Amino acid sequence: MVPLRMLSLLMLMSSLCDADNRCHTELTLDPPEVLAEHGESVMVNCSSGDTIHDGMSWKVGDTSTPPEYGNSLLKSVKLSWNVTAECKLILDGTHECSKELKITLYKNPETVELFPTKHIAAVEGKQYELQCDVADVAPVQHLTVRWYKGNETIKTDYSTQPNTTKSIVSESFTLAAKFNREENRAEFRCEAQLDFGQHRSQPAVTSKIYTVSVHYAPELQNKTEDVYVNKGDDVILDCEAEGRPAPAFHWSRDGVNLTETTNDLKITLATSAIYDCTATNYLGHATKQIHVHVIEPDIMEAPAAITTSEPSTPSSCPLVLTPAKIVVRFGDPASVSCSTSATRFSKIGWEAKSGGMTSNDTAIAWTIEKVKDWDTKPLCYIDKIDGQCSTMLDVTLYKTPDNVSVSALDQGPMVEGTEYQLKCDITNVAPVQQLKVTWYRGNETMHTDMFIDTRKTPVNVSSTLRVTPKRDHNEVLFRCEAELQLGLNGSERDPKVISSPYMAVVHYKPRVKTCKDHYARVEHEFSIDSLPCGVDGNPTPTIQWYHKGERINASEPLTRTQSGEYTAESTNSIGSSNFSVLITIEYGPSITCVGNHEVVEDDTFQCEADGVPKPIFTWFKGGYKDRGIKVVAPQRWTKNDHGNYLLQATNKHGQVTHELHVTVLYGPVFDGNYSAEVTVNLGENVTFNCSADGNPPPEIEWSYSPKANVTETTKGRQKSISVTRATSTDAGAYICVAKNKVRVVRRTVTLVVKDTPRQKAITTIWWLLIALVVFLILILIICCCRRKKQGQYAFVTDKANEHGLDIPMTPPANGVEA
């Protein structure tokens, strides 16, 4: 029966427990689930089939609405992170049922950005990484990121953060791939979308298209080539090369460098030689060797020459050119005098394509308005009686460049630590063999170039400067200067043409500057974003601050609980860097202890002053208004420290005072001296007094064996016990107990009651009588025991008993049988 009763009781308890959450008909929510964006408001209706109840209400967060008594209740719910909404139906005073609204909040990504993790072009055959940053999205566990190449989906990524994450976060995804040259200019994009399965997916947010540039080293179609040309003919040598970035070309003839920088080389009046063409970019180079073979034509043998008497060539020619050498700009006028010291001559003259003439005078001038013949060779001659002699004028015809310009061979901005090439193009200049190109970074000379070329006519040439930029080179001006070194004398200077400046844009990862390790600031007046910590980076970096591993709002003022180490993460497309600072939040003093305090004697009690910097804490004893006497805060409190105190705390941010009353508690202490033992004569009266001091005042109690002749009396703090006509039974210990909330103490008095001589004699007689009676009783007991042991005994063996014989072992005695 007992087990059945226990089972029934358990079933009853289970039913009572379940009754709290059971409705006769289930609550219905419309809509049953909410999927909405953070910050929206939704209307939700709660209805019930129960018509008898004590009210319906909504609980949103920690706030409940007043109960209403209909069958449905409509509620507007403002949606925020971690909000909860629950409809409740009150069945009676103690039972209710409820149903919680399932809420899923989301925030579509703020931005989706796609960029390479290293701000350089992809290199064929080497791994290249793209990064897709999805900013400010929630809940991240429903985020799907798809990668596209053109219109083809090539990868799908999902968040790796915990499924419980509800707050707004940012996350990065990467795509690693190797590209070939056919994929140059391929277009990539990433797409971020919140996917809630059967409910619905949110609109996708797509990044801008990123076009991949694939670089590769130059390649030549042929490594060697033989070219045959007739003597005296011109020929164009071709050096076709494929590469990205487009390669620069360099030519040499039989090991001597030429100035041509294009992929084809025009040769006038070709001669047999070996030409090397090298195509170069920053990934490598390739060289092609071209062998030029000149073919000699067949020539018929000429008849023998007719010998004639030749005029003798004088050892010297009496002609003087003034000036002996001229340097003239193309298209400018020129004039040179030719004179002779000879007296016997027929004529003197100039032989030239332009300006030729003769004269009989001893001097003649060659004058031309515009010198435009690049191969001009004016010759002054004189016909003497003994023959003709001549001298040629040394003419240097030059032309300054039409244009000098600087450009970059590599695409995009420069990146710190990566080699780049700048190109200086000099257009239409002559004579190129006297051209000097000087490169400048700011006002610093970086490089000079000279050219080996025998052509006299204007040509286009270029010079290349290899630079590995640093962040300090950002916005620095590069320029090149083309100077014709013509050897001019006097006040004339060699002509120069300077390019327009080329401003270098150098990208580099963030780096902190001008930031100390520690800052002290005032509470509520300081936020992290007001720190004088500059971060240098190009492109301009974004800065995110963290405290104790959590991302913070850097514009929010800090409070006293937020002192500590703060770490900034600065990021741009080149990279990221971190730095930390220690922040101490200062605030005015405060005193935290209560106004009244109890402390046990010889115990510790510290009333602390809080503040940063640490306040100067001063104690004054004796009063509040007049401050009292300055004292040192007691380390161990005594009863003398009891009283009123005024506490004062001061630091650079202010001063506060606090009134304090200290009550020092101490355990009971017995008053006066006492005797541990008191002796009285039998029949005399005796009184014991007991009093004690303590805080709080102690209670006094006597502990003893109660008797009719023992009484207690109380007078003030003293409690007395009196023994009237003391007897021997009153002798013993009388204990005084004093106790308060601090401790309990005891004092024992032993009462000794002494007999008189007559009483001692009577007592002795009584003890002797008692001893005599005890002795007589013991004698009687011994005699009775001895009497029972006397009589006649017979002993029979076991074998005799087997045959039924009774054989006595001793003769029968004459005594009485026992």
Image (cartoon, rainbow, N blue to C red):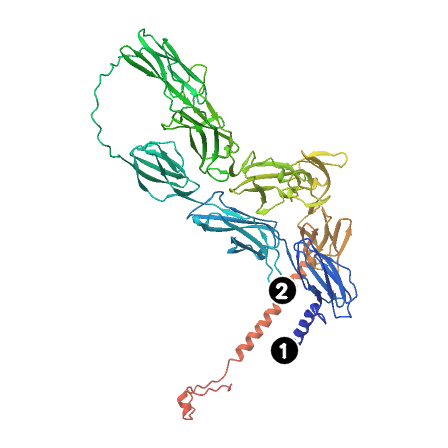
Please tell me which of labels 1 and 2 falls first in the chain.
Answer: 1
Residue 429 position within the rendered picture, expressed as x and y whole percent measured from the top left:
43, 27
Residue 668 left/right relative to 405: right
Label number found at residue 768: 2
Q: Nearer the viewer, residue 689 or 223?
A: 223
Residue 405 position within the rendered picture, expressed as x and y whole percent measured from the top left:
48, 31
> Which residue sits at x=37%, y=8%?
361
Neighbours of disc 1 within 10 Å: few (<14), some (14-19), many (20+):
few
Residue 548 position within the rendered picture, expressed as x and y whole percent measured from the top left:
58, 46
Q: Which residue lies furthest to the bottom in this view?
A: 804
Q: Quadrant of residue 86?
A: bottom right
Q: Nearer the viewer, residue 177 or 547?
A: 177
Q: Circle 2 sits in a helix, a strand or a loop, which is it? A: helix
Numbered marks: total: 2
Name the residue that disc number 1 marks: 3
Q: Nearer the viewer, residue 597 or 739?
A: 597
Mark pair 1, 2: CA separation: 71 Å
Q: Circle 1 sits in a helix, a strand or a loop, which is it? A: helix
Residue 685 showing in the rendered view: no
| Residue 493 in the image: above or below residue 631 | above
Neighbours of disc 2 within 10 Å: few (<14), some (14-19), many (20+):
few
Quadrant where the image shows the N terminus: bottom right
Residue 717 left/right relative to 807: right
Q: In which quarter of the image is residue 797?
A: bottom left
Residue 345 showing in the rendered view: yes
